């Protein structure tokens, strides 16, 4: 019961907060003029939502907000709906210039700032699952942070890594990259085994792979990594991993 | 930089500005532009591509009864069709049927029965729609499918988990939505000696906020 009450309170707070934030932001919107013969206005932010109003050339619209590639607009006679970015990009601003709106495409994928994704695969015979985020210093060079979890027959593991990645040909649709870096990897034996202790080791890695541009903001990423686990046992352990995943850029 | 240096810099800047102003006064401007231009950039348009949600529901933990569940989710809507989401959920497994029937010392302590899941999924909005409750109230809606992978912590171990499901989203406003979700979390566990595949089906309802 207590839990339920706290939930309701939380949701109520969230609601009031969001409403107040919205009213504050209502004051002034970006104005644009329709230059094409017409502008289709949809009921929702998607192609699947019906067109319920068509605004004409010369009408001024207020652009209220955006959601993915859709813009919420209000016409001079108070009709609110959603228009696609490609249509909004053809409207004109107060200086009669087309709006500077670009849709994510292959060209913009070459100049991305952020990239993030999830990958699944094999880590030396164990199942592997990893997430990563990259920040691009230039079109070619990026700093990459990743978190990996592995699930094996006798032990599980988790690791955090940071590295640097180089993509020599960002202009290719299927584009190779190489990375080097290091981090920490923790091995945790399964609980049904005779108690062996958790191990925490330093790791260095080298990786190579391919990125493939899919559509919009999406990339497919195939990666081979070679991890060198520097343990204080007799030998360092070398583990090969293959992962495949989907990423988005921004 | 210490305060003294900052002060000197400030004075210098002020001096240079004021001398520039004095210089300008000399050649009086003939035409005073009367432009009331609104310079709001396209970048200033508010975007709402992220959402956080809080769900409550039930989960059937295989062999460990059906229990309450709380779930927190973060989503990034990449396009009108595709989104990424990260979820964290918590539930408490109960006694197994064996423990109920045989009694005696339970097989697991309470802590081990805590069922926590973390997963990341990709979602597909497949059926966008528009709902009319009356001629005054109508809302946008979405039906979506998700596929993901993650981690289940249960019975003292971590298990690699595949998660798939679907849901229905009703947008009360542009930034507030009600969700009804069904997910199945599949993982193999060897807790009882041999490896077995378990399906853990979850049903939840929640509220999400776009920002």
Image (tube, coloured by chain):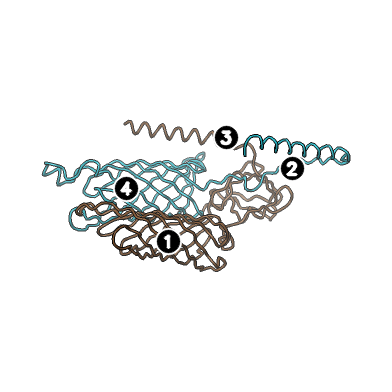
Chain colours: A brown, B cyan
Quote the CA–CA distance across marks 4 and 2.
55 Å
Give the foreground label among 1 and 2: 1
**Disc 4 on helix, strand or loop?**
strand
**Disc 3 on helix, strand or loop?**
helix
Instruction: Identify the residue under disc 3.
Output: A23
**Labels 3 and 1 within one chain:** yes
Give the foreground label among 3 and 1: 1
User: Where is residue B189 shown, x and y percent of the image?
Assistant: 24, 55
Instruction: Identify the residue under disc 4.
Output: B202
Give the foreground label among 2 and 3: 2
Q: Which mark is residue A245?
A: 1
Residue located 42% across and 53% down the image: B144
User: Where is residue A157 shown, x and y percent of the image?
Assistant: 32, 55
Quote the CA–CA distance across marks 2 and 3.
24 Å
- Position of residue A201 relative to residue A124, above or below, is above
Q: Is residue A163 left or right of residue A82?
A: left
| Near-viewer residue (B97 or B180) | B97
| Near-viewer residue (A159 or B210) | A159
**Labels 2 and 3 within one chain:** no
| Near-viewer residue (A59 or B62) | B62
Quote the CA–CA distance across marks 3 and 4.
36 Å
**Labels 1 and 4 within one chain:** no
């Amino acid at each position: 019961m207590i839990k339920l009450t706290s939930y309701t309170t939380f949701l109520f707070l969230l609601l009031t907060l969001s409403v107040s934030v919205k009213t504050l932001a209502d004051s002034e919107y970006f104005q644009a003029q329709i230059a094409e013969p017409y502008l289709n206005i949809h009921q929702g932010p998607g192609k699947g939502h019906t067109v319920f109003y068509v605004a004409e050339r010369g009408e001024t619209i207020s652009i209220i907000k955006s959601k993915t590639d859709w813009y919420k607009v209000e016409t001079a006679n108070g009709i609110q709906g959603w228009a696609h970015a490609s249509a909004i990009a053809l409207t004109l601003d107060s200086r009669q210039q087309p709006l500077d709106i670009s849709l994510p495409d292959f060209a913009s994928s070459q100049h991305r700032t952020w990239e993030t994704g999830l990958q699944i695969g094999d880590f030396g015979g164990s199942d592997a699952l990893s997430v990563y985020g990259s920040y691009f210093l230039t079109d070619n060079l990026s700093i990459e942070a990743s978190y990996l979890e592995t699930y094996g027959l006798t032990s599980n593991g988790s690791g955090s890594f940071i590295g640097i990645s180089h993509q020599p040909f960002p202009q290719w649709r299927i584009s190779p990259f190489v990375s080097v870096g290091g981090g920490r990897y923790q091995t945790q034996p399964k609980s049904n085994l005779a108690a062996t202790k958790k191990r925490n080791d330093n790791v260095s890695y080298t990786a190579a792979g391919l990125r493939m541009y899919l559509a919009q903001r999406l990339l497919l990423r195939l990666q081979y990594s070679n991890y060198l686990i520097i343990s204080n046992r007799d030998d360092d352990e070398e583990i090969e991993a293959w992962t495949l995943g989907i990423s988005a850029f921004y | 930089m210490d305060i003294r240096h900052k002060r000197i810099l400030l004075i210098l800047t002020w001096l240079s500005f004021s001398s520039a102003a004095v210089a300008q006064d000399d050649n009086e401007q003939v035409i005073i532009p009367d432009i009331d231009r609104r310079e709001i950039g396209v970048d200033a348009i508010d975007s709402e591509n992220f959402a956080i949600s809080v769900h409550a529901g039930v989960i059937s933990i295989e062999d460990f009864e059906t229990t309450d569940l709380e779930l927190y989710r973060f989503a990034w809507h990449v396009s009108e069709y595709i989104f990424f989401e990260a979820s964290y959920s918590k539930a408490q497994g109960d006694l197994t049927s064996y423990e109920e029937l045989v009694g005696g010392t339970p097989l697991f302590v309470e802590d081990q029965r805590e069922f926590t899941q973390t997963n990341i999924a990709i979602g597909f909005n497949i059926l966008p729609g528009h709902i009319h409750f009356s001629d005054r109230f109508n809302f946008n809606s979405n039906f979506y499918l998700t596929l993901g992978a993650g981690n289940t912590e249960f019975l003292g171990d971590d298990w690699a988990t595949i998660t798939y499901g679907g849901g229905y989203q009703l947008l009360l406003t542009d930034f507030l939505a009600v969700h009804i979700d069904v997910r199945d979390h599949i993982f193999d566990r060897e807790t009882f000696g041999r490896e077995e595949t378990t399906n853990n089906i979850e049903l939840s309802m929640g509220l999400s906020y776009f920002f």
